[in-house]
Each structure stands twice: as structure tokens, then as C-alpha cells.
């Protein structure tokens, strides 16, 4: 391997690791604050919160979610050629686009809140939370431009730090505001004769207020970084001797044409959730399920199941985001060997994390729900048991989506997502109507969607890049290590739970048994992965804390 390739590999994985760590921290913070939030607003409040957030999320996808990826791609391509002034032009053009698209989206959501929540999704009280979220669309659009700009320059640090700060502020404000507004909602509900639902609705609005405040904090932080960087960036522009500079009339069409495929891909890729909600709630009501029962089921799905599933998925999202600039640079330089190397490395990195997370969630479903949400209901645990496998499928499909965008095959994920969406919706209706699976139909259909996307995207990646996946190291080794880990974790939990319950309460026994089982599982997985040759010294060194991991492996004689 050439020195250049080694440097490219290390830099690629390091930047991916930085963003992955930030995403994991953000998800963990998000998981932690959802515990007191759920305790305050309940499953019904989670339904209102989730409904508002789904609508906000899909409008965000349409208006500005694709901006960071598009900006990073365009900036990276220009910086690779030394066209710094053109990269600056991309930044300004993207900001103009963000103000227009984000501003329009904010107005549409604010004034259309009642239509979206009440008419389409049969959850009218979530309009309160949705209106609180509306201004966030403009803030996130502008924030996305600066994050994409720095990612295009090859650094994930501003995005990573702003992401963590955003989530911490979000967590604090969400919990505090939810408690204050929940109490206010009780008084409103007392006047209107519906204390439970109005308290939950206003509590959910408090939760969404945290999202708005967190985004505002992240924008202020990244603007501070940008203005501090301005002097250095101007010096870089001064050294740019390019004679033919791009104009806004050149940049904006390119930006829009780059955004549209990414937009279509991410929209189709994520729209299934809001469509699922509309189909599920309407069909459930037609089948005779009560509004309260339907709301509770969806509240568990969106407030517990999806929150837990999304923690490991953050790694795949981070790897996808970090893949695009580096792959774009390698692809534009016609460095086929580096492209193949990075694709294989990214898949390996993601699978090493996705498999144990999926198995752990499935094996310890009920203990984890009891530990975090004091939820011992079998129906809630069964959601995680059935849907845990989707962690692997979503991780691979998310990563391959980013890889295809990085090698200029941006229309392929759109076509694949459309095929998977239609197939998934047909399956969802069949499972609800013919088999009466209620909320489990949504989980099975989602897992099928992710599996189909995974297969279609991964096939396209291998076909167009010429890369090949080392099945033994990428798939079989982490799978085998995860299965062994799962068996050990299951046995350790039940053994310690049976011991602790003899001398303490069931909840405290579950807490200690769950923590011990998870810690043992981590050690078992690390050892098993080395025994099954899932990682070697070169791979370990590229992980955060790689030197320490290698030292431990050598001391245990697991590396030779």
C-alpha cells in the first residue's frame, strides 16, 4: 500500500470515527433524556411528540436535510482541485438556498400544523408540539450548510462538537420545559374537560422546544467557529490562482442538481415512517381498536423502540456522512484502489458495531426496557425482539446509500428506495388487514424495507465500484462473535437476576443484572471477535483508543 493510500485510509476512518463518536454520544444523551421525558408525558405524550417530530422530520428532509451532504460533496470536489474561491461560492449559494427553502418550510409547517396532525395522522393535539418545531426548520437549514462546508474541507470536528452541544441543550430544555408545560396542560385540560390528553400534548410541546433551542445553540457555536476560521480561509482564497471562476449562475444549478437526487433518496428513504403512521392509525381505528390503545402502541413504538434502535444506527449515519467527501475526492482522482479500500473498510467498521448491538437488543429486550423506562410489558419487549435485526439492515443500507452518492451514482438509491417503499407498504397492509398484527406489522414491514434496501444498495455498490467484500471478516466473524456474546449475556442476566432478586426488589435486581450482563457481553464480544479473526492489529489501530485495545489484545495473547 502506498503512503498516500495509508494516509487516506487513516484520515477517512479517523474522520468517520470522530463523527461516529459524536453521533453515539448524541444518541446516548437523546436516550437518557427520553427516560425522564417519557416518565413525564407517558406513552400518549410520546405519541404526540413522535407525530409532531415525524412531520417535522419529513419536511426537514424535503427542505434542507440533503444540504450538508450536497455542500460537502461540492466543496470537497473543488478543494481537491485547489479551487478555493469556487468552494466559497458554493458556501454562499448554499446559504441563499437554505434561507429560501428553510423559511418556506417553517411557514408551511406552522400554518399547516392542524391539517398535517389532525386530518392526515388522526392526532390533532400534536399540532401544539409541531408549531413549536416550525422555526427550527430554518435554523437547521442554515446550520446544515456550515456543517457540510466544514465536512467538505475534510474536518468533522465542528459538526461533531456542535452535534453534541445541540443534544445536551436539547436534553436539558426538553425535560425542564416538558415538566413546566405538562403542569400548564393539566390546567388547560381541567378547563376543557380532558386533563390527560392536554397535559400530554403540552408536555410533548415542551419536548419539542428542546429541539428548537438545541438547534439554535448549535448554529451559534458553528458560526463562532466559522468566523474564527474566516481569516485563514481568506488566505487560502488569496493563494488560489484559478483564472476562470464559477458564478452564482454556475453554482446554484449545480447545487440544486446535486441536492435533488440526494433529496429524493433521503425523502423516499425516510418517508416510510410517516406513511406507516397514517396507514397504521387509520386501519387500526377501522378494525375497532380504540384511539387510546392505538395511541399507546404508537407511543411505545416511537418513544422507546425507535429511540433504542436509532442509537447504533447513528454510527452508520456518521460513516455515510464521512464517506462522501473522501470517496468523492478518491473517485474524482480516479484512485480506484483507494475507493475499493474505503468501501470495504467502512462496511467492516459498521458491521463490527451493528451485529452485537442487534443481538444485544434482541437478547436483553425486556431487561433494557425495564432498566430505562420501567416497562415490563411483554408487548414492548416483543417489538425489540422482532425488530432488533433491522439494526444490521438499516446500518448497511444507510452506509451504502452514502457510498453510492460518493461515487456519483446518486439516482440508484432513489430507485432502490422507491422499490423498497412500495414493497414494504404492500406488506404492511397485508400484515395489518389479513393477519391483524397491529403494531408488530409496522415493525416487520420496516425490517423488510431495510433488508430490501440493504440488498439493492449493496449490490449496486459492488457493481459500480468494482469493490469486493471480505465475507469472512465483514459478516461472518462479527456475526459469530455476536451470537456467542448473546448466549453469554442471556445466561449471565438470568443468573444474576435470580441471585439479586433474593435480597432486593425486582427493579434493583434487574438493574444490577442488566449492567453486569452488558459489561460481560462487551468483553466476550471483544475476545470472540479476535478469536474469530474479525479484526487484526491494523484495523484495531484505526479505532478510537486503538493502541490501548492492541495492548490488551497482545497481553491476552489474542493477537500475534
Image (cartoon, rainbow, N blue to C red):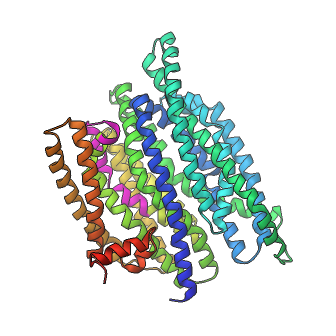
Q: Is residue 293 above or below residue 459?
A: above
The image shows residue 333 at horizontal and vertical percentages of 64, 82
398 vs 114: above or below: below
Residue 11 placement: quadrant: bottom right
What segment is highlighted magenta in the picture? 371-396
In this orientation, does residue 163 appear?
Answer: yes
Residue plotted at (71% across, 50% down): 98
**Residue under the point 45% across and 40% down:** 33
Q: Position of 184 compared to 244: left or right?
A: left
Q: Position of residue 180 (x, y in %)?
A: 52, 25
In the displayed structure image, the side of residue 236 where residue 38 appears, left or right: left
Q: Residue at x 30, y 61 (%)?
A: 522
Residue 360 within the magenta-colored segment of the rendering:
no
From what the image shows, is residue 480 above or below residue 93?
below
For the stretch drawn in magenta, the main secondary structure is helix
| The C terminus sits in image quarter | bottom left
Q: Position of residue 75 (x, y in %)?
A: 70, 67
Image quadrant assignment for residue 500: top left
- Of 532 and 92, nearer the camera is 532
Q: Is residue 418 visible?
A: no
Report the residue that reaches farthest toward the bottom: 2
Magenta residue check for 378: yes
Q: Is residue 448 left or right of residue 206?
A: left
Q: Is residue 253 left or right of residue 381?
A: right
Choose between 4 and 103: the one closer to the eye.
4
Residue closer to the observer: 90 or 180:
180
Q: Determine the residue located farthest toward the right in the rendered image.
A: 243
User: Residue 87's x, y, as percent?
Assistant: 75, 67
Return the residue nearer the eye: 328 or 266: 328
Amino acid at each position: 500500500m502506498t503512503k498516500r493510500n495509508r494516509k487516506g485510509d487513516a484520515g477517512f476512518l479517523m474522520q468517520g470515527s470522530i463523527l461516529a463518536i459524536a453521533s453515539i454520544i448524541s444518541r446516548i444523551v437523546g436516550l437518557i433524556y427520553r427516560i425522564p421525558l417519557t416518565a413525564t408525558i407517558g406513552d400518549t405524550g410520546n405519541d404526540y411528540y413522535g407525530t409532531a417530530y415525524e412531520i417535522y422530520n419529513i419536511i426537514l428532509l424535503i427542505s434542507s436535510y440533503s444540504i450538508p451532504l450536497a455542500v460537502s460533496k461540492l466543496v470537497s470536489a473543488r478543494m481537491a482541485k485547489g479551487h478555493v474561491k469556487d468552494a466559497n461560492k458554493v458556501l454562499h449559494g448554499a446559504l441563499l438556498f437554505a434561507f429560501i427553502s428553510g423559511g418556506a418550510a417553517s411557514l408551511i409547517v406552522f400554518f399547516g400544523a392542524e391539517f398535517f396532525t389532525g386530518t392526515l395522522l388522526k392526532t390533532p393535539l400534536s399540532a401544539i408540539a409541531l408549531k413549536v418545531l416550525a422555526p427550527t426548520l430554518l435554523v437547521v437549514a442554515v446550520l446544515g450548510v456550515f456543517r457540510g462546508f466544514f465536512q467538505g474541507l475534510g474536518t468533522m470536528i465542528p459538526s461533531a462538537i456542535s452535534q453534541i452541544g445541540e443534544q445536551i441543550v436539547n436534553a436539558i430544555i426538553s425535560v425542564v420545559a416538558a415538566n413546566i408545560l405538562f403542569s400548564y396542560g393539566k390546567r388547560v385540560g381541567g378547563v376543557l374537560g380532558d386533563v390527560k390528553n392536554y397535559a400530554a400534548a403540552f408536555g410533548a410541546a415542551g419536548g419539542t422546544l428542546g429541539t428548537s433551542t438545541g438547534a439554535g445553540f448549535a448554529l451559534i457555536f458553528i458560526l463562532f467557529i466559522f468566523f474564527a476560521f474566516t481569516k485563514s480561509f481568506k488566505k487560502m482564497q488569496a493563494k488560489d490562482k484559478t483564472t476562470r471562476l464559477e458564478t452564482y449562475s454556475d453554482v446554484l444549478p449545480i447545487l440544486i442538481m446535486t441536492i435533488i437526487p440526494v433529496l429524493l433518496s433521503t425523502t423516499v428513504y425516510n418517508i416510510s415512517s410517516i406513511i406507516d403512521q397514517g396507514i397504521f392509525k387509520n386501519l387500526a381505528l377501522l378494525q375497532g381498536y380504540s384511539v387510546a390503545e392505538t395511541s399507546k402502541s404508537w407511543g411505545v413504538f416511537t418513544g422507546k423502540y425507535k429511540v433504542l434502535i436509532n442509537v447504533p444506527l447513528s454510527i452508520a449515519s456518521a460513516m455515510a456522512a464521512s464517506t462522501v467527501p473522501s470517496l468523492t475526492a478518491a473517485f474524482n482522482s480516479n484512485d480506484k484502489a483507494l475507493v475499493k479500500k474505503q468501501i470495504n473498510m467502512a462496511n467492516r467498521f459498521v458491521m463490527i458495531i451493528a451485529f452485537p448491538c442487534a443481538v444485544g437488543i434482541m437478547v436483553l429486550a425486556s431487561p433494557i426496557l425495564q432498566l430505562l423506562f420501567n416497562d415490563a410489558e411483554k408487548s414492548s419487549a416483543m417489538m425489540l425482539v422482532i425488530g432488533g435485526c433491522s439494526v444490521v439492515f438499516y446500518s448497511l443500507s444507510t452506509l451504502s446509500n452514502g457510498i453510492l452518492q460518493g461515487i456519483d451514482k446518486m439516482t440508484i438509491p432513489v430507485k432502490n428506495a422507491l422499490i423498497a417503499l412500495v414493497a414494504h407498504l404492500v406488506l404492511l397492509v397485508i400484515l395489518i388487514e389479513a393477519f391483524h398484527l397491529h403494531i408488530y406489522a409496522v415493525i416487520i414491514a420496516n425490517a423488510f424495507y431495510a433488508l430490501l434496501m440493504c440488498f439493492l444498495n449493496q449490490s449496486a455498490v459492488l457493481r459500480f465500484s468494482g469493490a469486493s467484500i471480505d465475507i469472512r471478516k465483514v459478516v461472518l466473524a462479527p456475526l459469530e462473535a455476536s451470537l456467542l456474546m448473546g448466549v453469554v449475556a442471556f445466561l449471565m442476566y438470568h443468573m444474576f437476576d435470580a441471585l439479586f432478586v433474593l435480597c432486593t426488589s425486582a427493579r434493583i435486581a434487574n438493574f444490577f443484572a442488566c449492567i453486569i450482563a452488558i459489561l460481560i457481553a462487551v468483553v466476550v464480544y471483544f475476545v470472540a471477535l479476535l478469536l474469530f479473526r474479525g479484526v487484526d492489529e491494523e484495523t484495531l489501530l484505526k479505532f478510537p483508543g486503538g493502541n490501548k485495545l492492541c495492548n490488551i489484545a497482545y497481553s491476552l495473547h489474542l493477537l500475534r
